[in-house]
């Protein structure tokens, strides 16, 4: 069991391949980053509320995303990933969609995040940093949130997120940082290629 800390909130995680919601199917564990992709580290299950705003990102509110009605299966893992300085918390979410739902979600996400100024909602400020970061249907997004240290001093915390489509699957890979430290875009840019190759196996299996 691992104790995860993010923004002062604690969450317990148990070893597992993916998290299943009752309303949709479960994505098989083989579709997620594996220990051989992560330097020997294994992903772990998260509870239903952990980083829910990234599973998948819905800036501006769920009502904007009609694509979610075609969600077929999904899963999420969290990874305590070692870095040169210490370690960081990664979240990987994989969802599969019926028909053209995956492509539709990417279009809705692009429309929700104007290139000039992005969008601010109850979660924070969402900004597109780069498009095409992992293929044609992909976005690198920066999420800035207003937090406070225990002594009440304000800080701005930054999470970097890549959202990318492969076939009928959408992969969300985010670096949340550790405790009050922000995430690093270079980490997820390095891992999104292996993540997409894993998710691509969903096209060869019934989910």
Image (cartoon, rainbow, N blue to C red):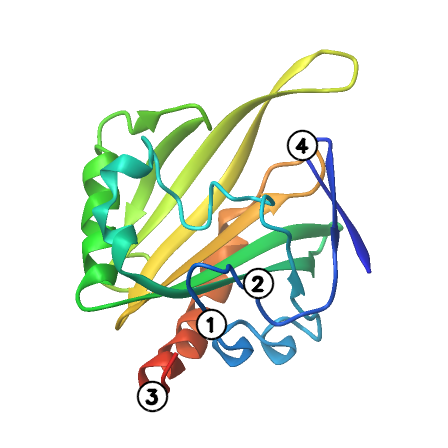
In terms of image quadrants, where is residue 77? bottom right
Q: Residue furthest front?
A: 22
Residue named by callout 3: 204
Residue named by callout 2: 19
> Which disc number belongs to residue 201?
none
Q: Earlier in the sequence, mark 3 or mark 4?
A: 4
Q: Earlier in the sequence, mark 4 or mark 2?
A: 4
Marks 3/4 in contact by CB < 8 Å: the verdict is: no
Kindly report the distance in space between the C-alpha atoms of the residues bearing marks 3 and 4.
39 Å
Local crowd size for mark 3, using a 10 Å CA cut-off: few (<14), some (14–19), many (≥20)? few
Residue 28 image position (x, y, % from top left)? 50, 77
Residue 46 image position (x, y, % from top left)? 64, 55
Residue named by callout 4: 7
Residue 14 image position (x, y, % from top left)? 74, 62
Local crowd size for mark 4, using a 10 Å CA cut-off: few (<14), some (14–19), many (≥20)? some
Disc 1 secondary structure class: loop
Whether residue 69 appears in this view of the structure is yes
Kindly report the distance in space between the C-alpha atoms of the residues bearing marks 4 and 1.
28 Å
Q: Earlier in the sequence, mark 4 or mark 1?
A: 4
Residue 184 image position (x, y, % from top left)? 55, 46
* Quarter of the rendering occupied by the C terminus: bottom left
**3 or 4: mark nearer the eye:** 3
**4 or 1: mark nearer the eye:** 1
Residue at 73% from the left image edge and 31% from the top image edge: 8
Whether residue 134 appears in this view of the structure is no
Q: Earlier in the sequence, mark 3 or mark 2?
A: 2
Marks 3/2 in contact by CB < 8 Å: the verdict is: no
Kindly report the distance in space between the C-alpha atoms of the residues bearing marks 3 and 2.
21 Å
Disc 3 secondary structure class: helix
> Which disc number belongs to residue 27?
1
């Amino acid at each position: 069991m691992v104790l995860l800390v993010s923004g002062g909130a604690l969450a317990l995680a148990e070893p597992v391949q993916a998290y299943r919601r009752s309303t949709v199917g479960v994505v098989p564990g083989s579709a997620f980053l594996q220990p051989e992709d992560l330097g020997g580290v294994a992903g772990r299950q998260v509870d239903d509320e952990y980083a829910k705003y990234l599973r998948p990102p819905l800036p501006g509110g769920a009502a904007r995303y009609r694509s979610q009605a075609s969600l077929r299966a999904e899963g999420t893992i969290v990874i305590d990933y070692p870095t040169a300085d210490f370690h960081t918390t990664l979240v990987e979410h994989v969802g599969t969609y019926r028909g053209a739902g995956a492509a539709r979600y990417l279009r809705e996400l692009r429309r929700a995040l104007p290139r000039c100024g992005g969008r601010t909602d109850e979660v924070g400020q969402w900004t597109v940093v780069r498009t095409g970061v992992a293929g044609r249907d992909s976005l690198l997004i920066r999420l800035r949130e207003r937090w406070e240290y225990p002594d009440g001093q304000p800080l701005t915390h930054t999470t970097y997120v890549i959202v990318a489509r492969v076939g009928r699957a959408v992969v969300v890979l985010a670096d949340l940082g550790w405790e009050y430290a922000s995430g690093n875009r270079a980490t997820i840019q390095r891992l999104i290629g292996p993540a997409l190759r894993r998710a691509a196996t969903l096209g060869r299996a019934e989910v």
